[in-house]
Image (cartoon, rainbow, N blue to C red):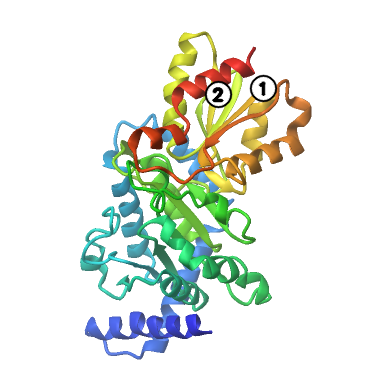
């Protein structure tokens, strides 16, 4: 394949030229092999992603109680994860537009080119289909690429590579190839970015077999999910919201990861289960303050894993509250909320005391005008009204 050939050349450059430039004359092929063997040994030491969930659970439980730690913005937490994984595993590399010396459009990769060199932090032409395909080929050849879309909407140009190659090659090759690739970038409705820069691609990607999808919402889970995605043997799409990059939070100094398949209990409650993710987590929590003042006790869950859903956590909540409200920024037609509602009906129908309600964005292109833009996405007042209706 052209992608595999390009990746083979890149791999030769990464391990051959990189070795030569360090003053240690050795051939490229043995270097590449030794790097892959060392990385494989490291990955085996971690075991499966599900086994690492215990580490994530311990970190989740301990983060609130730790007096130490350091404050970071969300984009800085993502950057920390990249630096730690690139230092630990020489097969990890980054591709994308302006990810090198410019540092990325939202500075997630700032300083990485100086730390790791231009071949591990590779600036690419404006050609999403080409560099995403190169990332798939690099993953096939033993590297662990992180492909950044400058804006998630641009990755529609690479839809063929993400669907037909990234998601399916492990199966269509009969298990000969693994595709340990991370595809990440900013998306969601920002502030007057216009329709083409306000895409929510969850609904586009959720039906692709073999693809995992997660959405970060805090600096803590952004770092933990990024590290877990890089270590995963599966292709993972990490959704970052353009309006959350400057969120600040204290995170542990110690290493931690978050399970890719686990939801987060944000607020325990008794009256209604509110399922949400990404930016809408904050709209829900704003609404929750009003609801508590009105005598309601909502349980809020950040589902985090958009594919697959954590039906264990979701189900336990529904068995307690018997009412469900889904709040998303994705489009109503064919969105994550529609899939989640279907899964709940299939698995927990007998526990429901009221119809499932779903608040989603309007099925229209996102307007540029600020007032109209706000009208297309779910607002806290709508969440309050929906809970009052469900709990009647």
- Is 271 situated left or right of 80 in this image? right
* Residue 41 in view (yes/no): yes
Q: Quadrant of residue 184?
A: bottom left
* Point 75% across, 25% down: residue: 351
- Is 206 situated left or right of 146 in this image? right
Counting residues from the start of the chain, the first of labels 1 and 2 encountered is 2
Residue 264 is situated, as x and y percent measured from the top left of the image, at 52, 36
Which secondary structure, mark 1?
helix
Picture disc at residue 288: none
Residue 114 versus residue 74 in the image, above or below: below
Residue 104 is situated, as x and y percent measured from the top left of the image, at 28, 59
Picture disc at residue 299: 2
- Is 363 situated left or right of 198 in this image? right
Give the quadrant of the C terminus: top right
Depth order, front residue of 373/234? 373
- Is 106 situated left or right of 161 in this image? left
* Point 48% across, 75% down: residue: 142
Q: Quadrant of residue 153?
A: bottom left
* Point 48% across, 62% down: residue: 156
* Point 38% across, 81% down: residue: 10
Label 2 packing within 10 angstroms: few (<14), some (14-19), many (20+): many
Q: Do the residues under discs 1 and 2 have CB atoms within 8 angstroms?
A: yes
Depth order, front residue of 18/392? 392
Residue 82 is situated, as x and y percent measured from the top left of the image, at 35, 58
Residue 364 is situated, as x and y percent measured from the top left of the image, at 50, 43
Q: For the residues marked 1 and 2, what is the alpha-carbon distance in whole angstroms?
A: 10 Å
Label 1 packing within 10 angstroms: few (<14), some (14-19), many (20+): some
The residue at which mark 1 appears reads as 320
Residue 353 versus residue 2 in the image, above or below: above
């Amino acid at each position: 394949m052209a992608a595999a050939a390009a990746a083979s050349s890149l791999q030769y450059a990464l391990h051959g030229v990189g070795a030569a430039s360090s003053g240690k004359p050795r051939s490229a092929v043995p270097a590449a092999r030794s790097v892959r063997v060392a990385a494989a040994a490291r990955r085996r030491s971690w075991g499966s992603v599900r086994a690492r969930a215990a580490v994530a659970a311990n970190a989740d439980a301990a983060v609130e109680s730790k007096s130490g730690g350091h404050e970071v913005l969300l984009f800085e937490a993502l950057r920390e994860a990249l630096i730690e994984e690139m230092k630990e595993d020489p097969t990890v590399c980054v591709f994308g537009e302006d990810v090198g010396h410019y540092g990325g459009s939202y500075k997630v990769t700032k300083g990485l080119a100086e730390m790791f060199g231009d071949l591990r932090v590779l600036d690419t032409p404006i050609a999403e289909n080409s560099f995403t395909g190169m990332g798939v080929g690099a993953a096939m050849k033993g590297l662990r690429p992180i492909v950044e879309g400058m804006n998630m909407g641009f990755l529609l140009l690479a839809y063929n590579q993400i669907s037909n190659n990234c998601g399916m090659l492990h199966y269509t090759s009969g298990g000969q190839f693994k595709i340990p690739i991370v595809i990440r970038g900013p998306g969601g409705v920002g502030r007057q970015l216009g329709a083409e820069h306000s895409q929510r691609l969850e609904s586009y990607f959720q039906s692709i077999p073999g693809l995992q999808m997660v959405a970060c919402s805090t600096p803590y889970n952004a770092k933990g999910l990024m590290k877990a995605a890089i270590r995963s043997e599966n292709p993972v799409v990490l959704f970052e919201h353009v309006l959350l990059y400057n969120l600040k939070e204290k995170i542990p100094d110690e290493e931690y990861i978050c399970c890719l398949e686990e939801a987060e209990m944000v607020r325990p409650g008794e009256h209604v289960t509110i399922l949400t993710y990404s930016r809408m987590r904050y709209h829900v929590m704003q609404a929750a303050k009003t609801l508590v003042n009105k005598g309601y006790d909502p349980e809020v869950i950040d589902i985090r894993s958009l594919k697959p859903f954590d039906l264990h956590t979701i189900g336990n909540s529904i068995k307690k509250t018997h009412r469900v409200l889904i709040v998303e920024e994705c489009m109503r037609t064919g969105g994550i909320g529609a899939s989640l509602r279907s899964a709940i009906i299939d698995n927990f129908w007998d526990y429901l005391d009221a119809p499932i309600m779903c608040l989603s964005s309007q099925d229209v292109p996102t307007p540029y005008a600020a007032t109209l833009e706000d009208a297309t996405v779910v607002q806290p007042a709508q969440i309050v009204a929906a809970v009052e209706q469900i709990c009647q």
